[in-house]
Amino acid sequence: MPRCCGRRTSPRCSNHTPIPNPSPNPTPIPKPNPYPNPSLYQDIAALLTCLPTAEEEEVLAAHSTGPADLAPADEFQWRLRAVPRCEARLASFLTTVTLEPQARAVGRQLETISAACAQMASSSGLQLVLAQVLLLGNAMNADTARGNAVGYP
């Protein structure tokens, strides 16, 4: 198992592949594809799980010689520490990637409900059935204060 500064890292990070050395002028992150690859969700979620814990942060902070002598998993965590607000950024990106497909699904459901309501409102057969139910209710409640209920024309 890889070691970080003489200590073993957690097993959850030991199977991750190393990342290349970032360039001094990072390129901007492109906007997400409106139809992203479904595995992107799992990749970002997995990346969130391999962020360094508070204990690992302390161990990595005490390591002052740089990432050259670290194991690949420890080097990966060391580089993640250099990204400001890394966890918040990844969580935000995950939300950005998943929000649009969820909104499209809700939109389709709302369209279905709206179409069903329009069909119900324009259905003469449904109006006839409801008028018969109203007549039956009035007949049952004829001698009470609730009798003679009036429906919509």
Image (cartoon, grey):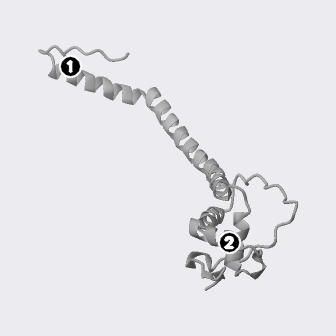
Q: Amino acid at mark 1?
A: Asn
Q: Which of the pair 60/50 is nearer the observer? A: 60
Q: Which residue is mark 2?
A: 62
Of residues 87 and 128, which is closer to you in this image? 87
Residue furthest left in the image: 143
Q: Report x, y in % for residue 91.
A: 62, 55
Front residue of 109 and 5: 5
User: In the shown orientation, is residue 113 left or right of residue 57?
Assistant: left
Q: Residue furthest bottom?
A: 1
Q: Nearer the viewer, residue 50 or 137?
A: 50
Quadrant showing the N terminus: bottom right
Q: Which residue is mark 1?
A: 138
Which quadrant of the structure image shows residue 146? top left
Residue 124 to residue 43: above or below: above
Name the element at disc 2: helix
**Image quadrant in which you'd find residue 47:** bottom right
Query: Amino acid type of disc 2?
Result: Ala
Q: Nearer the viewer, mark 1 or mark 2?
A: 2
Q: How many marks?
A: 2
Question: In this view of the protein, can residue 1 be seen by the observer?
Answer: yes
Bin the neighbour count of mark 2 within 10 Å (Cα to Cα): few under 14, some 14-19, many 20 and up: few
> Could you give the CA–CA distance between mark 1 and mark 2, rounded to whole angstroms?
83 Å
Q: In the figure, residue 20 lies in which quadrant? A: bottom right
Compared to residue 140, the image places residue 97 above or below, namely below
